[in-house]
Image (tube, rainbow, N blue to C red):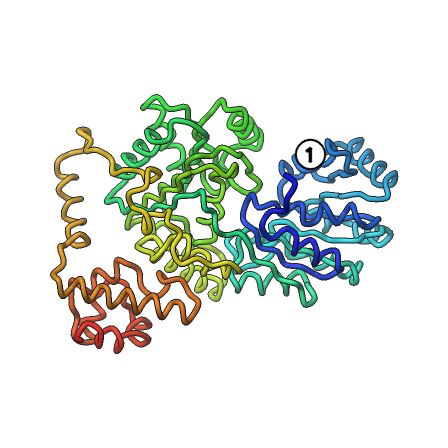
Amino acid sequence: MSEFRLGQKPIIESVLKGHDVLAVMPTGGGKSLCFQLPAMVKEGLVLVVSPLIALMNDQVHSLKKMGIPAGHLHSGMSVAERKATFAQLRANKNFILYLSPERVQKEGFSAWLEKQNVTLYAVDEAHCVSQWGHDFRSEYSMLKTLRDVHPKVPMIGLTATATPLVKKDIIEQLGLKKPDQHVYGFYRPNLYYQVEFCADDLEKEDYVLQALKQTPKGRVIIYCGTRKKAESITEFLKGHGESVAFYHAGMSSIERTDMEIQYQEGKVRILAATNAFGMGVDHPDVRLVVHTQMPGNIESYYQEVGRAGRDGNPSTCLMAYSKKDKGLQAFFITNSRANKKIKTLRWSALDAMVNYAEGSECRHGDVLIYFKDENRIKKCGHCDSCDPKSDLKIKQPPKETRRPSFEKKKRAKKGAHVTASLSDKQKWQMDVLRDWRKEYSNENDIPAFMVFSDKTLMDLIVRGPETEEQLSEVYGFGDKKIEEFGDVVLEMLNM
């Protein structure tokens, strides 16, 4: 490739000027070049903190193939291998050294670092330093030590997902000094985002089968909320003749590594996995990502769907969502050891995820607003909101004879309220509410789903509340929503 990807050039320019930098770019957006290229310009050591041994190994291998001096230090190396890395470092004027965050905390590391000619610190997956983020790791909390040893050495923090709150926390936790902030590339035009409400797990399984039927080629990732679900969906798909395996944190490191190799080599086409499979994954031909259970926040969702279509070719991202998915995530929050403030933020993040699942003006456009991307779009033209007739959309599965008749009746009853036919007046009211929601979200620079989901709008129209007391019965209308929007909504409904 002879051209920079979106955002790479301005980020590299900031680094070369010696500024601290916070760079937010999508998975597969080319974050590594933003510190690798500057490493070749200025003589000295570039120290890179990375949480994944597999990712370190891959990047060092690639750099060495290109003739760029690089090495790593991690727990999986022998004494002889570590000595060889130090020897290579001493023998080269320019060197890129990858370390785990735990290595920075080792006794004697600071004394060694003080003697080195360090030109740049790079912290990959920088969102791990923030307790407000979706993947906090306590070992990242000690990385400020790097600035204590060499306070004048510039630092770049890189991540694929960070809300404004997480960005602010990264800056504080890493001690970045007035950093140049670059937020680019959340828009993935080759991905088709789709969310389908399912009454139960049987319907979700039907959607998974239909998705696989429509995606006969390329790799597939099926994300599950629990280890048990990853294993059960694997057995279910094997029963339908699919080449599938599971991956989760309950497996041994040897088992996980073996499964990664099988998936990499194409021996397994479909991987049913928890969020343990993700960070650093870079397969170009993932044509389908399915969420069988809703993630706990939009950051996790975006990072996971971002593993699709790395080669730029069309890919589908389907979330099969059901009412009990929120209950699962609520269980995780309630039983976590986080403090009250962090739990409160996680509840808010879960509410945003639910609203996104239940309706959006434009799936891609709302994601760009949510992450405050520097480039915005109003309509992407390739999500289930913008183009419900796309060939990339997973079709509604045909009825399965294996499903009991009472289950069919139960599902029909649940869907009746949402699909109720609207009168001309109700359609007009829906247009009024949608226009107001769009205007309000634009003025306040928030996604439309964070005002009201489509499900809430539909319930408003069907119920037609006339008082605040009646508003409290509308789906998604708690005390806070009533206080903030009650008067204006009632006024629009009674125009």
Using the image, determine if residue 490 lies above or below residue 474.
below
| Quarter that holds the N terminus | top right
Q: Mark 1 belongs to which amino acid?
A: Ser
Residue at 52 percent across and 25 percent down: it is 262
Residue designated by label 1: 62
On the image, the x and y values in percent for residue 256 come to 54, 31
- Check disc 1: other Cα within 10 Å, few if <14, some if 14-19, many if 20+: few
Residue 264 relative to residue 73: left or right: left
Q: Which residue is nearer to you in this view: 18 or 479?
A: 18
Residue 137 visible (yes or no):
no
Q: Nearer the viewer, residue 113 or 440?
A: 440
Residue 349 vs 287, above or below: the answer is: below
Circle 1: element type: helix
Q: Position of residue 439 (x, y in %)?
A: 35, 69
Looking at the picture, tell me which residue is in the foreground, 455 or 233: 455
Q: Position of residue 81 (x, y in %)?
A: 78, 32
| Camera-nearest residue between 364 and 58 | 364
Please state, as top left, top right, bottom left or bottom right, where the C terminus lies in the image.
Answer: bottom left
Q: Quadrant of residue 74?
A: top right
Q: Residue at x 16, y 62 (%)?
A: 462
Across and down, in percent, residue 118 comes to 81, 52
